[in-house]
Amino acid sequence: MERRQVQRSLQLLLGQHCRWVVAAPHVALALLISLTKKICCCNATGRSLQSRLCQYVPVDVVYTWVNGSDPVFLDDLKHAKERLTNSRGRVPLKGCPYAGCVPSHMVALDRLLPQRTKLEHVRDQNAFLSAAQHLTEPRLACGSHVENRTVLWFSNADKAKQALSAAVGSSMSTSASLSLGLSRYNLSLCHWTTDWTAPNSFPMDEYFVVSDLPPTATREKLLSALPVEIKESIMKVWYYEERHLAVLHTSNSSLLAEFLSSSGGFFEVGSGVQVGVSKANLISQLPMYADDETHKPGR
């Protein structure tokens, strides 16, 4: 609904000069405040507003709505989805449905390995992880939500997927896991996405995604189109030709933040061709089930 339409609806409901409206908390309250510029009172307090209404008529219910754009609401919805990720009776998720979503070069464990565990120890007990290059414990944080996981790095997404396939085959199970001593740790392939509202996704300050690349694009052409200071800070490029997308790793997160802010989400790669650029978010584990209409932002 257009802003003017919403404002007109409020005027018709409560009167042109009404100083008070009844609103629900959250997004609708903020919307009504911005539209009316008047004093608002929430009926959640239980205080009667009959004497303050412009027209002395009973008010049984006031309908409010959201348009799915409030960041606080989206963050709450995201974490609610995470809690419902394994709810039964829902449609199994196939692939990754989120914007700009591609498999990453990282494999996440379901929890932290013991302190001072070395990559050599992990590879010695799990031959299928011989291609793993690094073992890290990145701080995966989104607002107040923090996940503590050990992450294995591979040279590319294909190597990571091959390791997981080998893990499933070696354990005679439908899910991948590794052994360390007497303990077992579940494994999941991490994914990149530009959608920060995706469940189990975390912003990665040193990574960014370039999307809508033309068919003629290459790693070299992409790097040459970047500002010089950004180009010099690039440590690694993962190019997904079939998705016309690339994920880049920079050594300077502050410089990247300035670039993303000043670019407005786009930059030119030559001949007037604009491509999208945005912060990369890492999905530590894809949900088992797809979203349904019950969990849409506009509900």
Image (cartoon, helix red, strand yellow):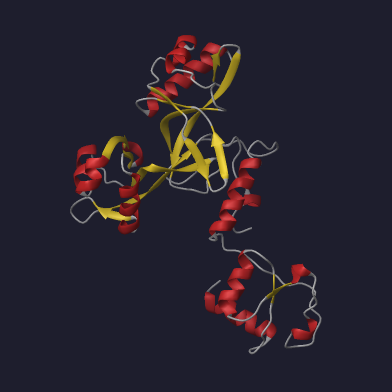
Q: In this view, does 252 lie to the left or right of 54?
A: left
Q: Which residue is drawn at 63% across and 50% down?
A: 295
Q: Residue at x 26, y 41 (%)?
A: 233
In this rendered view, identify the residue nearer to me: 114 or 1. 114
Which residue reaches farthest bottom? 17
Q: Which residue is drawn at 54% across and 48% down?
A: 143
Quadrant position of residue 204: top left
Q: How many labels does the image show?
A: 0
In this rendered view, identify the residue nearer to me: 212 or 61. 61
Residue 99, relative to residue 241: is it above or below? below
Q: In this view, does 260 lie to the left or right of 272?
A: right
| Residue 174: x %, y % from top left | 58, 20
| Residue 195: x %, y % from top left | 47, 48
Q: Residue at x 62, y 81 (%)?
A: 38
Which residue reaches farthest front? 116
| Residue 220: x %, y % from top left | 20, 38
Quadrant position of residue 272: bottom left
**Which quarter of the rendered picture does the C terminus lie within?**
bottom right
- From where the camera sits, is residue 50 visible? yes
| Residue 55: x %, y % from top left | 75, 88
Q: Is residue 9 left or right of residue 210?
A: right
Q: Is residue 47 left or right of residue 226?
A: right
Residue 162, relative to residue 205: is it above or below? above
Residue 168, relative to residue 1: is it above or below? above
**Which quarter of the rendered picture does the N terminus lie within?**
bottom right
- From where the camera sits, is residue 217 visible? no
